[in-house]
Image (spheres, coloured by chain):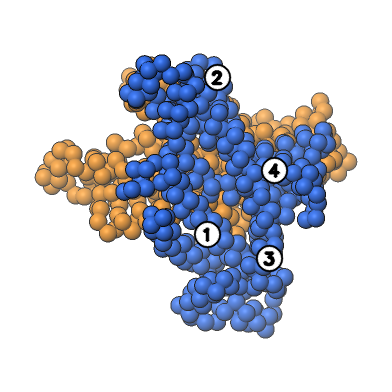
Chain colours: A blue, B orange
Amino acid sequence: MQYALKRILLGLPTLLAMFTAIFVIIRVVPGDAAAVILGDQASSAALDALRLELGLDRPLSQQYLGFLGGLLHGDLGTSLVTKRPVLEEALRVLPNTLELAAASILVGLALGLPLGIYAAIHRNAWPDYVGRLFSLIGLSLPAFVSGILLLLAFAIQLRWFPVIGTSANAGPWDRFLGVALPALNLGIIMSAYVARVTRSSMLATLGEDFVRTARAKGIGPTAVALRHVLANSLLPIITVVGLYFGTLIGNAVLTEIVFNRPGLGRLILGALNTRDYTLLQGLMIIFASFVVLANVFTDLAYAAVDPRIRNA
Amino acid sequence: MTASLAILRDTTRFISRGGVFAWAGLFLLAAIVAMAAFAPLIAPYDPLAQDIVNRLLPPSSEFWLGTDSYGRDVLSRIIYGARVSLFVGLVSILVAMTLGTALGVISGYVGGRFDAFVMALVDLMLSFPSLLLGMLVAAVLGASIENLIIAIAVTEIAPFVRLARAPTLMLKEQEFVQAARSMGCTHQRIMRVHILPNLIADILVMGSLWMATAIRTEASLSFIGLGVKPPTATWGGMIREGFENILEAWWLAVFPSVFVFLTVLALNLLGDGLRDATDPKLRQRD
C-alpha cells in the first residue's frame, strides 16, 4: 500500500514535465498562432479578439501559470470552435474510447500470450516460424491499413458487422458488434508485440536451473510451462504491455477514424482540421495523463507479480 | 578491389547469419527501391495526368490497378509514391539517427548533470505516444515535406540516444580510451574515432527497424491529412482519398495499403534478421 502511494506520487513530476512540453510545443507555432488559426484573410480586429481570447497578449510566464492553474481546477480551456469546455467535449466520448481500449487489450492478450508460449515451447520448429512471421506481419501493419482491410472484408463484403459506428443508445448486442471489429484490429496488432516478448522471455527462463529441477521432479510439460516458466517470465511481458499503451493510443486514434467511431480519435482529427488549438492541447493533456497512469499501473503490476519488488 | 570484395563477402556473411527472413527482407526492399528509382521508366502513365472519361475504373488489362476519381492511373501513382515514402522515411531516420547518436555519445561521455537531464528528456519522449507527438509537431508546423520529416525525426530521436549512450558508458572506461587520452587526444576525437566506430553496427541495424516505423508514421500522418499536399502522389494520401470512395472503389485504398505494408515488412524482416545476427546470445545457439 505504501509502495503504491509512493509510486503514484512519483508519477506527478512526469505529468508536470509532459504538460510543460505540450504547452511549449503548442506555443512554438511559427509566427502568430491567431494568424495560423484564422488564416491570411482575417481582419486585424478579429486577430486581436482571438489573441485576447487565447490569452496570447499576456507574457509567456503568465500564460504558463494560468495554464497550470486551470489544470489544477480541471479546466482544460474552451474549444475555439464549439465554445464548450474541452473537458466536457472529451468526457462525452471518452467511454467509447475506453471501451475500445479495454476490448483490444483483452483480444491482444488472449491471442498473443498463447501464441508466444506455444512458439517458445516449439522453438525453431514450424510453429515458431509461423509465430515469428505473424508477429512481424502484425508489427508491419499500420493500424489504419489493417483497419481498412478488415472493414472491407467483414463489414462491406460479408456484412457481418455494421459499417457505421453504433449510436449511443444501442442495445448491448449492437454495441458488441460495433466494438468487435475495431477491437479485433487493435488486438491483432497488439498480440504481435505480446507474442514476441512472451516468446523471448519464456526462452530466457527455459534455460534456468529450477526449470530442469521441476522437470526432473516429474512435473508435466504443460504445468512446467505455465506454472514455472510463464510465472517467472511475466515481468518483461508486463513491461511491453505497459509500454505498448502509448502505441495503442496512437493506433486507437487511427482505428476510430477508419471505423467512424465517436471517440477521442475523431475529436482529435476534428481539432486538427479546424485548427482548434485549445481542443488539441486539452486532448494531448488527457492522452499524456493516461500514459502516466498506465506507467503507474505497470509498476504496481510488477509489485503484484514479484514480491521482491513489493518489499524493496 | 580486394578490399571492396572483402567488404562484400563480410556483408553477405552477416546477412546470411540473419537467415531466410533477412534475405527475404533485402530482396523485397531492393525491389521497392528499384521501383522508386526507375519510376519514369516503369510507370505506364503520368501519375498526375487526369482523365475524367476513365475515372474510377476497376483493375483491367489497360489500368492494372484501376484509376482514381480524377481518372489517374493507380499503379503509376503507387510507383511514384514510393519515392516520397522512401525519401521521407530515409531522411527522417538519418536525421534522428545522427542527432540521437551524437547526443547519446556526448551524454554518456560527459556524464553528470548533463547526462541526467538528457536521460530525463529521453524518458519523457519515450513515454509520450509517438504518433500523437508526430501529429502535434506536424500540425503546429503546417503540412509540407520538410515539416513531415522534422515531425517524424522528432519522434525517433529518443531510442537512438539510449542505444548510443549505454555502450559509451562502458567504452569510456576501457583502456584504449584511457591510452588515447594520455596520448593527448581531444575529447571530441576520442568520441569520434574511438567510441563511435564501436557502436555504429548496432545503430545501423536499429536504423533499419526504425525506418520501418518512420515509413509507417509517414503513411499514418498522410492518412490523417498532415502529409505532403496533393496532387503529389503519396501512399498515405492515396489511401486517404481511396478511403473516401471505399464503398464504390475498393482498389483505391487497398493497393497503396499493400505497398505500405510490404515496405514496412521488408525493413522489419531485414532489421529483425540483422539484429539476431549481431546478438551474441542468439548466435551461440546455431
Task: Identify the residue shown where x is 25% and y is 53%.
Answer: B111
* A42 versus A226 height, above or below: below
**CA–CA distance in space, label 3 to label 2:** 47 Å
Q: Are marks 4 and 1 on the same chain?
A: yes
Q: Quadrant of residue A103?
A: top right
Residue corresponding to mark 1: A289
**CA–CA distance in space, label 2 to label 4:** 27 Å
**CA–CA distance in space, label 4 to label 1:** 23 Å
Q: Quadrant of residue B168?
A: top left
- Spot occupied by residue A6 in the image (x, y as percentages of width and height): 38, 58
Residue A89's label in the rendered image is 3
Please tell me which residue lies in front, B98 or B135: B135
Q: Dot 1 surroundings within 10 Å: few (below 14), some, or many (20 or more)?
A: many
* Residue A169 visible somewhere in the drawing: yes
Task: Identify the residue shown where x is 77% and y is 47%.
Answer: A172
Please tell me which residue lies in front, A2 or B160: A2
* B105 versus B75 height, above or below: below
* Residue B97 visible somewhere in the drawing: no
What is the three-letter code of the residue carrying label 3?
Answer: Glu
Q: Are marks 2 and 4 in contact (CB under 8 Å)?
A: no
What is the three-letter code of the residue carrying label 1?
Answer: Ser
Task: Point out the tag, 4 or 3, that comes first from the N-terminus.
Answer: 3
Residue corresponding to mark 4: A182
Chain for disc number 3: A
- Spot occupied by residue A244 in the image (x, y as percentages of width and height): 52, 44
What is the three-letter code of the residue carrying label 4?
Answer: Pro
Chain for disc number 4: A
Residue corresponding to mark 2: A127
